[in-house]
Amino acid sequence: MAATIAPLQSVCFASSRLSRFPVSWSSSFSRSRRFARRVSAMASQDVDLEVFGKAATGTGSPSNQRGDCPFSQRVYMVLEEKHLPYKATYVEEGPNKPDWFMQRNPSGLMPVLRDAADWIQDSDKIFEHVENKFKEPSLKTPDEFKSVGAGIFPAFTNWLKSKDRSAPAKQEFINELTALEEHLKKHGPYIAGKNPTNSDFALAPKLHHARVALKHFIDFVFPSNLQHVAKYIELMETRPSFKKTDSPDEMIIAGWQTKFELPDKIDKNSGKEKKTAFTPLV
């Protein structure tokens, strides 16, 4: 079963003369009318987009229950931010993906975007395709900012899979967060300034996974002195596009536990495991 995601609905605005209203009202009306025309134009283009992303474990393929993939969430967020209608189809990870899916996507990797008859795999390539075809609003990150935050996710996964609270990757992860803090202090509140771009939609889900997983398995919380990072996370995670496409913390925890064969809790003594009563979400 596939989940159909509806675009934001067009809003009708009064056509009375805007000169009767204050300038700020006129500007707001003008922007809203442009947005309504853009949504109407997209509908007339017969947009046919379908995203294949990770399904919740044990829900079958296809499923109507979204899984915990930060790369898929990036794609969902981009489509939401561009106000594009799309269908979301969720496929379970593992060796038993449906034949119809593997025939069109032999690697089996997700996310995958189907645009009419074209299939695009890899979240970077999907963004390029969407940005080139649906140019407004532009979400392209300036070249000089594209690498900001890129080292956070690798440092996080290296630390988590080490099963060692004091692994060298811990300091690498903190260093990456500190570098992001310094960048946001100078260029924020978002990576490229006052508006979020593609790099933010790629980073925000990864930061969320890192916060949830590290807190659960290692009792690590992001340093309180990283105030710009904290504000950045708040800004991103309160966006409608994030809240609409997020996964429950329990699902994120269960996903990483399965991926890296983690204990329920990594003990304070390196390499020792402590069992807890945590039950993965199914």
Image: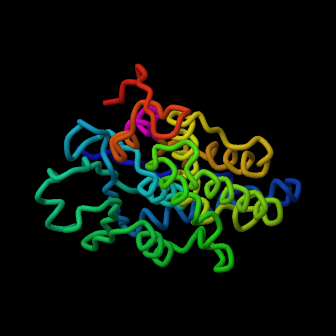
Quadrant in the rendering for residue 59: top left
Look at the picture and state if 208 lies above or below 178. above
Out of 260 and 252, give the one closest to the viewer. Answer: 260
Is residue 234 covered in magenta? no
Segment tinted magenta in the rendering: 247-254
Q: Is residue 20 left or right of residue 102?
A: right
Q: Residue at point 58% right, 45% down?
A: 166
Out of 235 and 210, give the one closest to the viewer. Answer: 210
Relative image position of residue 246 (x, y in whole percent):
49, 43
Q: Quadrant of the N terminus?
A: top left
Relative image position of residue 63 (x, y in whole percent):
25, 42
Relative image position of residue 29 (x, y in whole percent):
73, 56
Q: Quadrant of the C terminus?
A: top left
Quadrant in the rendering for residue 223: top right
Q: Is residue 176 left or right of residue 257?
A: right
Q: Residue at point 51% right, 40% down?
A: 270
Out of 254 and 65, give the one closest to the viewer. Answer: 254
Relative image position of residue 222 (x, y in whole percent):
68, 43
Q: Is residue 167 left or right of residue 250?
A: right
